[in-house]
Image (spheres, rainbow, N blue to C red):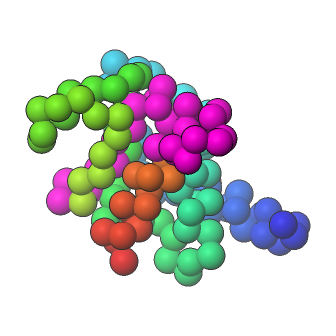
Amino acid sequence: MSLFERKLFIHRVAKFVRKHKFVGSSIEVTSQMKIMIAAMAIQLSFGLKNYLYPLFHTIIIYPKAYKSTITNKMHQGESNPKLGVLIFSWESFNEGIRIENDNLNLGLHEFTHGLHFSF
């Protein structure tokens, strides 16, 4: 990655953090959490001109799997374009990054839904 691309990536991550509201549910949202989530989003949309997931304005973070108010089932994450919300279990989000060889990455999965709904 060139120096220009690195600077562009950092700029886009910062803009994503500014443009989205981060809400913790039974967890305190830290700057590191915001940056990690934003970096995942930008990693997926980096080659696009429109990269901010325009239908989504809020990121909700739970500490672990949670009971969805929509399906009444346990979830690790979900995307709801009608409400403009992306939801993550922080434990599952991190596991998706930490375990590199299982093809399970919650962040990429939910942000792929976000791209699909947004464009």
Residue 73: where, in percent of width, then height? Answer: 17, 32
The quadrant in which residue 96 appears is top right
The residue positioned 34% from the left and 26% from the top of the image is 65
**Which residue, as the protein is rendered here, is positioned at the far front?**
102
Work out whether 101 lies above or below 98.
below
The reply, left or right, for residue 114 in relation to residue 107 is left
Pick whichever, 75 or 81, lies toward us. Answer: 75
Query: Magenta region: which residues?
Result: 82-106
The quadrant in which residue 54 appears is bottom left
In the picture, the quarter occupied by the C terminus is bottom left
The quadrant in which residue 101 appears is top right
Residue 86: where, in percent of width, then height? Answer: 34, 48
Residue 19: where, in percent of width, then height? Answer: 45, 57
The reply, left or right, for residue 11 in relation to residue 52 is right
Magenta span includes 87? yes
**Which residue, as the protein is rendered here, is positioned at the far top?**
26
Magenta span includes 73? no
